[in-house]
Image: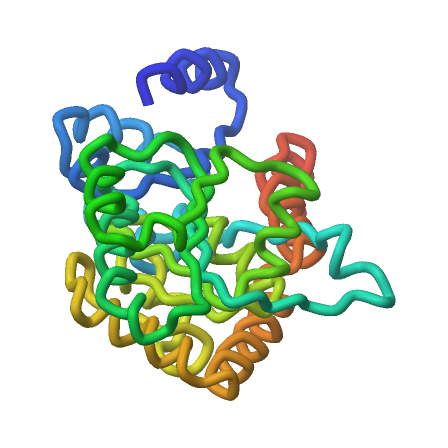
Amino acid sequence: ALRKTIFFLTSKLFFKPVILHFHAFAVETTTEGPFRLLYKFLFTYADRVLVLSAYWQDAIVNVTNRKASVEILYNPLMESSLTNRPEFVRAQKPYILFAGNLIERKGYIDLIRAFFKVASKYPAWRLVIAGGIASSGIIEEIVMSGYESRFLFTGWVIGSVKENLFNDASIFCLPSYNEGLPMAVLDAMSFGVPVVTTPVGSMPDVFTDEENILFCPPGDVDRLAIQLSRLMESSDLRRKIGEQAKDYTSKIFSIRQLSAQLSGIYESLSPLTTHLGVD
């Protein structure tokens, strides 16, 4: 926010309309954090604020009382090079995929501990973790668990390597403690991978539990293990959740549809259309 303020003030100085895209993961670090007055200033004087869901729209309206200037614009999904191929077929190998920063907020440690609870029941399954470097403490737990061979840490992945990981996964899990609208969840859904995650941030506004996603409370390792076990046990449930998620995301998060919405927002604020009185 401090960096953006430089461009914000410069634009206002020259009477340029300003659109703010707000993709934060928690009100505690933004609108209710130590820089809340700065955020209030930016949101109050921006011509339009774009947020990821009704949850964030309400959070900003509570600060500014300017609902008309706050608009929901979802993260768009690019069509992958894999799913565009006519011969595309999902591999669906027996592993759970996590993709994201390996920080506590993302819940990856909870996922590892939940996997410990179900690993003996499903000996063919593995846990694949794509991201940064795991803490030494959790690595020690994995070694001590006796399931070390069932874990794969890939590090950061991009391009075809990333796409193949999502394509081959049978389950995706992101048990975060707070989020905006995580792209990793949308990526998984675009491949038809069933998702287990937490109802934080925009998630419960956008998705429906037991229909196109499975929710569990953040920090509840026992419930997370149950949700994972349900999917590991039933290929029918995996197919149902995954297909409904893919169908839903293809309609709601289409990059063409969202690009048109964004273009309309810019056009509505352009000095030319404003001068001509064009909506």
Q: Does residue 276 show up?
A: yes
Q: Is residue 163 above or below residue 33?
A: below
Where's residue 204, x and y in %?
A: 32, 67
Q: Is residue 35 left or right of residue 91?
A: left
User: Which image quadrant for residue 229?
Assistant: bottom left
Where's residue 93, x and y in %?
A: 57, 66
Q: Is residue 16 left or right of residue 102?
A: right
Residue drawn 40% across and 14% down? 9
Where's residue 98, x and y in %?
A: 42, 51
Q: Is residue 187 above or below residue 119?
A: above
The foreground one among 147 and 107 is 147
Q: Residue furthest bottom?
A: 236
Q: Does residue 61 show up?
A: no
Residue drawn 43% across and 41% down? 153
The foreground one among 81 and 91 is 91
- Please identify the quadrant where the N terminus is shown: top left
Where's residue 188, x and y in %?
A: 53, 59
The foreground one among 208 and 234 is 234
Q: Is residue 194 above or below residue 158?
A: below
Q: Is residue 119 above or below residue 66?
A: below
Residue drawn 34% across and 62% down? 197
Q: Is residue 59 left or right of residue 244?
A: left
Residue drawn 29% across and 45% down? 106
